[in-house]
Amino acid sequence: MMKMRMRRLGMIACILAAMMAQAAPGIAQGWPSQPIMLINGFPPGGGADILARLVAGHLSTALGQTVSVDNRTGANGLIAAAMVAGARPDGNTLLLVTASMVSMAPVMPGVTLNFDPDRDLAGAAIIAGLDNLLYVNPRLPFRTLQDVIDHARAHPDALTYGSSGVGSSYQLWAAQFAAMAGVRMVHVPFRGGPPAIAEVIAGRVDMMFGNLAEILPHIRAGTVRAIAFTSDPPSPVLPGVPTIAASGLPEYRADNWFGIAAPGATPRPVLERLNAEVNRIVTDPAVRQRLIELGYQPRGGTMPEMLRTIREDRVRWQRVIQANNIQGE
């Protein structure tokens, strides 16, 4: 049923893109002239949602128009991506785009994309990277990464790890870890990060590779225990928590990022304005500090740099997918 829905969305995207390509050049003048919708493909309360709402507030001020967040969840964000790919290219429908949508999904076996992310989406700017980490249920005896590895080696397929879905970045981070550590674990996918986190807290799932933004309150409350960061450098928000690379797997690194994208035919001046505003936002000292406190790594940069990041990540994660025989849905 999900594939049928994605297929219909893809057909709509192609039809609308063809119909509206002629109108696009005249749209840039006077933009924005009406409220803007920022589509987020992940559930409320997760790392994507936290960042989307923070950035939407600042964009509203910068652009002089209300920027609202609309959560359209499912298929690891691809339902949201297809919706924006088929939207009118007038700058009034934007996507909170992730590496998983444009770098992982296109090279994931079993995932059928009914839009072309390189043609039907236009990247405006990377907002921020994520501080990502491995955390466990606190009732488990693990305190270090080596504790996890030793237990997993002694008990193959005994440890369970949650993720935000089959083929998600969370699954890929865990698969990369398992391959490098020489261990076997059981994947338990969920529809988004928050429901997976709830199962780790409840103790029905042992651990998870996820982002700091959505798990930080639970770490501070003691309902999960941070083991090691997958990303580098480690976040100053959790001093004393090392990286996986510094804890015995020196070649390990797994990260993600969030950005702003628009329909592929969006006029260049609109994209350039979005890029400029995002860069202004993430270089503001107060915003940067807030992003760091929430578990993000402020980025920014040019549109060509974003495109290069997408392509480099696609090559990197394709290797992980093929090496671990990962299949999407």
Image (cartoon, rainbow, N blue to C red):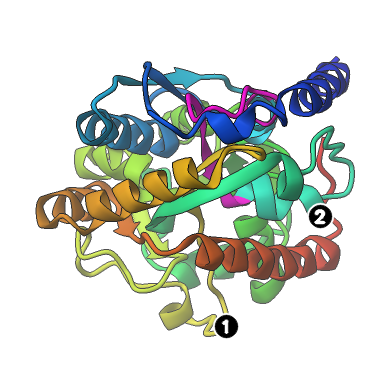
Q: Residue at x 88, y 49 (%)?
A: 109
Marks 2 and 1, the one that precedes in the sequence: 2
| Magenta stretch encompasses residue 91 | yes
Q: Residue at x 85, y 64 (%)?
A: 322
| Residue bearing mark 2 | 107
245 or 62: nearer the viewer:
62
Horizontal and vertical percent position of residue 138:
36, 45
Q: Nearer the viewer, mark 2 or mark 1?
A: 2
Q: Is residue 182 visible?
A: no
**What is the secondary structure assignment of the residue under circle 2?**
helix
Residue 68 in which image quadrant: top left
208 or 17: nearer the viewer:
17
**What is the secondary structure assignment of the residue under circle 1?**
loop
- Neighbourhood count class around disc 2 (C-alpha, 10 Å): few under 14, some 14–19, many 20 upward: some
Q: Is residue 298 above or below residue 212?
A: below
| Magenta stretch encompasses residue 208 | no
**Hey, what amino acid is under mark 2?**
Val
**Hey, what amino acid is under mark 1?**
Glu
Q: Is residue 296 left or right of residue 153?
A: left
Label drawn at residue 251: 1
88 or 318: nearer the viewer:
88
- Could you tell me which quadrant the C terminus lies in? top right
Which residues make up the magenta segment? 83-99
